[in-house]
Amino acid sequence: MGENLSQPFEKSAMTQEEMVKINREQRIQTIAFAFMIAITLLAFIAVGADVVPGAFATPFILGLAGVQLFLQLFYFMHLKDKDHGWPNTFIVSGIVLVIPTIVALMLLIGVTKY
Amino acid sequence: MAETTDLSKGLPSHPERATLEGKNKFLGFWVFLAGETTMFATFFGTYLGLRNGTGSGPEAADIFSLPLVFIMTMILLTSSLTSVFAMFAMKKNQFKKMKAWMWVTVALGAAFLGFEIYEFVEYVHYGLGFTTSAFASSFYALVGLHGAHVLFGLLWISLLLIRYRNSGITLTNAPKFYVSSLYWHFIDVVWIFIFTVVYLMGIGG
């Protein structure tokens, strides 16, 4: 095994079936990218053209960012694929920690003290 | 490993996780990304806490320019897609294609970084130095930290591409390329929240 580690391969071991699957996957990723572009456009238009009323704009664009986070993590970074149980555990733990961190910092330094 | 992976038929369909070392790199990198997420959270929290503390310096809405941020966002999003394509090429054992997509990713990342430097220089001209106000410090720290990540990613991926320019896709370098592309996606994930929380909320929220 050791000597095989730095050897290139003549061909891929993928079967015809796997090839069809990976090509479909690639199309799905491209569609996910189109969605991301659309979501980004929507967020910029909402703020830039003032089409969403002021108080609703912040939750609206944060929601869009959440959708985009989901698309990046689960599609581009393959978290939805099988054999990704531990990566899911790690990243979800990270995201769970993010919320109290941000809220605590905002409350601690942001209310009156600057 | 040799028992579970048959190499006689060619490159395994998941070359990045065909060896134990590759599996460990893959898992360890996700732990790292979880840690990075938390680190960025502290910078976001600080920025959100201090963003109204502009003192006598310029405010967010005075200096931010949406078109520039929009262009930067599109560049970084596209670079995320090109690195996805590079990973598909890697799994199919198309070495030339993978290299080409990776170099496109690097070029787009460099363009992004160029715009960011231009942006910071503009802000300094408007009178927003690092120590001008609490807003300025937390803004430069957060966006600058992201920029530093972009720079590191560019150097990392370029180094991999130069080192393995002739080697073909092997079980040694496949995990390295895969992990660097995960890192690149993560940079894009952070940018999604920077353009939303810092720029869009700074202008309209």
Image (cartoon, rainbow, N blue to C red):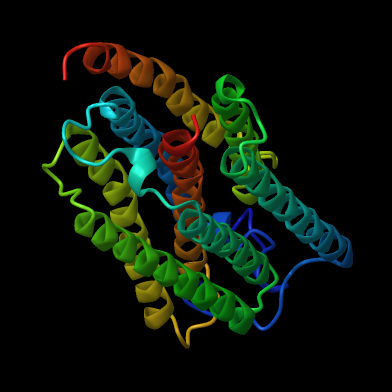
Q: What x and y, as percent, mark residue B98?
A: 59, 75
Q: What x and y, as percent, mark residue B103?
A: 50, 77
Query: What residue is shown at x 18% (from left), y 32% (from top)?
Result: B134
**Position of residue B111 in the picture relative to residue B170 (left or right):** left
Q: Decide which of B162, B8 is in the foreground and name it.
A: B162
Q: What x and y, as percent, mark residue B149?
A: 33, 54
Q: What x and y, as percent, mark residue B205?
A: 49, 29
Query: Which quadrant of the view contains residue A110?
Result: top left
Q: Decide which of B77, B121 is in the foreground and name it.
A: B121
Q: Residue furthest bottom?
A: B166
Q: Decide which of B124, A93 is in the foreground and name it.
A: B124
Q: Residue furthest left?
A: B131
**Position of residue B190 in the picture relative to residue A78 (left or right):** left
Query: Which quadrant of the view contains residue A19?
Result: bottom right
Query: What residue is shown at x 75% (from left), y 58% (from top)?
Result: A30
**Position of residue B131 in the picture relative to residue B68 (left or right):** left
Give above or below for B165 relative to B141.
below
Query: What residue is shown at x 50% (from left), y 34% (from top)?
Result: B204
Give above or below for B103 relative to B29.
below
Residue B184 in view, yes or no? yes
Query: What residue is shown at x 52% (from left), y 61% (from top)?
Result: B71
| Quadrant including the C terminus of chain A | top left
Number of callouts: 0
Q: Decide which of B33, A70 is in the foreground and name it.
A: A70
Query: Which quadrant of the view contains residue A99?
Result: top left
Residue B178 in view, yes or no? no
Give above or below for A3 relative to A52.
below
